[in-house]
Amino acid sequence: MSSASLGSSFRDPSGFLFTRDGVLHRQVNPVYREHYDRLMTSGLYVELTDAGLLVRHAEADLPPADGTTAYRIVKPERVPFISYPYEWCFSQLKDAALATLRIQKRALRHGMSLKDASAYNIQFHRGRPLLIDTLSFEILREGEPWVAYRQFCQHFLAPLALMARRDVRLGQLLRVHIDGVPLDLASELLPWRTRLSFGLGLHVHAHAAMQRKYADKPVRPPRGRVGARGRQGFIENLESTVRGLAWRPGGTEWAEYYRQTNYTDAAITHKEELVGRFLDAVRPQVVWDLGANTGRFGRIAADRGIPTVASDIDPAAVEIAYLEARKRKDEHLLPLLSDLTNPSPAQGWAHDERMSLLARGPADMALALALVHHLAISNNVPLDRLADFFADAGRTLAVEFVPKSDSQVQRLLATREDVFPDYRQDAFEAAFARRFTIEAAERVRESERTLYRMRRR
Amino acid sequence: MADRRSRNPRRAAATLGLVLAWILLFPPRAAAYLDPGSGSYILYILAAALLGAGTAIRMQWRRIKSWFRPSPKGENEPPADE
């Protein structure tokens, strides 16, 4: 039996994740025994898993990971796609924050507390935020402050405040600051008037000032200072501060996209029908809809019960897709923010804590609908390089070619010189044939567009 | 009465001494793998005192209001946190 620990799972001495023969397990170290037993016997585990807030696991009768001793080995339910906070839209981060606080409130009622509040411990599973780290709980330290308060503010509150009160694109600071947005930076970037809001004034601005004042000063606050009421009041205030932050998409080019397309009703219906037919021909287990906009075509896969990642560069489009999926209680569509010209890299310690986008693939099928012309013309990516990227992203591909004569391509060329003599259908087919076998090509009705189904060589 | 009053400052000093000794002897447990941050720790203590008092006032206010109102259905259910 071969086992390997995960590169992202090394900070917490309570245990770690490892794979054995390709199956994910979590080791509970002897040091965590008391806390694990309390989680399992206090009723907290049952309450949280029943509420869909904590990942379910089964205890496994297996030897520990190589060279270690274990108290327990558990096998958690597998989440089909791991996403990161810098790939979430505003409401996804907000829902993850509220789920974390809800979990903490329930933990407190059972005499436990979260010992970390990392946004990376939350994953979207069946359309809802889920805590995936079973070892995040500890027996409540009576009288002591919440040890994860700073982390909660850095991972959730500060980026949410920046997105809501300054610019939604500041959510991308999470990609640079892997342990959350430093509070002094958030305090500096937020508009001055946010100091007048009690919640942001306290948890971001005063918090940043206190961190500055006590930086590197060991402080031994007396025990017994924080009572149950204080804890409750604190968590409720954090919750109402998060709830008070809102961002409404609008005004961005892409969120309006479907209202601006040149499709006739017949063309869009035919395109949907073709996507459905391609999906039925391939029967993929996992689909990535790249450049998904508000997820219209990805939903065709999700409606078939296929776990589907619908990624787009525009925060507004992803926000709309998420709100729609949440409203429809869609369990299979995961909208994510992704700039394909600069997709999520491998990062963190030794480049091994957070996976690159492609390392999380390939999908069984990638959809690249109305995408090639944007990457090829707006971003000058040669067609053969596009074919290479899509071959890494999906074992099969549904891809749309939009010719130069199409008004949408004309729009892209309107403000720039046409330096794309190779952007032609025959050159596209030749470039993609290098990496794929073209299995089907269908002209979309009442349009100049062609939809291809391809299989990676 | 006079005797009791004269003993109080001494008792208070002794208590304070004991508390300080307790803090020095038993600093917060270092088992947490996260550094909570000194500033965050102190802010939490101060704010929790304030917000806890707010919670207490709200609870009292709710109790006072309930005297004048018939108890609603499902009062004995656990508090919702959703």
Image (spheres, rainbow, N blue to C red):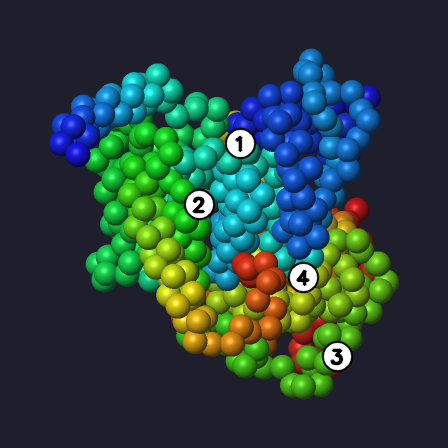
Question: Observer-nearest residue: A155 or A242?
Answer: A242
Mark 4 residue crowding within 10 angstroms, few (<14) / some (14–19) / many (20+): many
Cα separation, mark 4 vs mark 2, equals 40 Å
The answer to whether residue A432 is seen in the rendering is: no
Dot 3 and dot 4 within a common chain = yes
Hey, what amino acid is under mark 2? Answer: Ala
Chain for numbered disc 4: A
Q: Nearer the viewer, mark 4 or mark 2?
A: 2
Residue A344, position as x, y percentages in the image: 53, 46
Residue A434, position as x, y percentages in the image: 73, 49
- Tell me the number on the disc at residue A351: 1
Q: Nearer the viewer, mark 2 or mark 1?
A: 2
Among numbered discs 1 and 3, the one appearing first in the sequence? 3
Residue denoted by label 4: A333
- Residue at the extreme right of the image, as rendered: A281
Among numbered discs 2 and 1, the one appearing first in the sequence? 2
Q: Do the numbered discs 3 and 2 sit on residues whose CB atoms are within 8 Å? A: no
Horizontal relation, residue A40 to residue A243: left or right: right
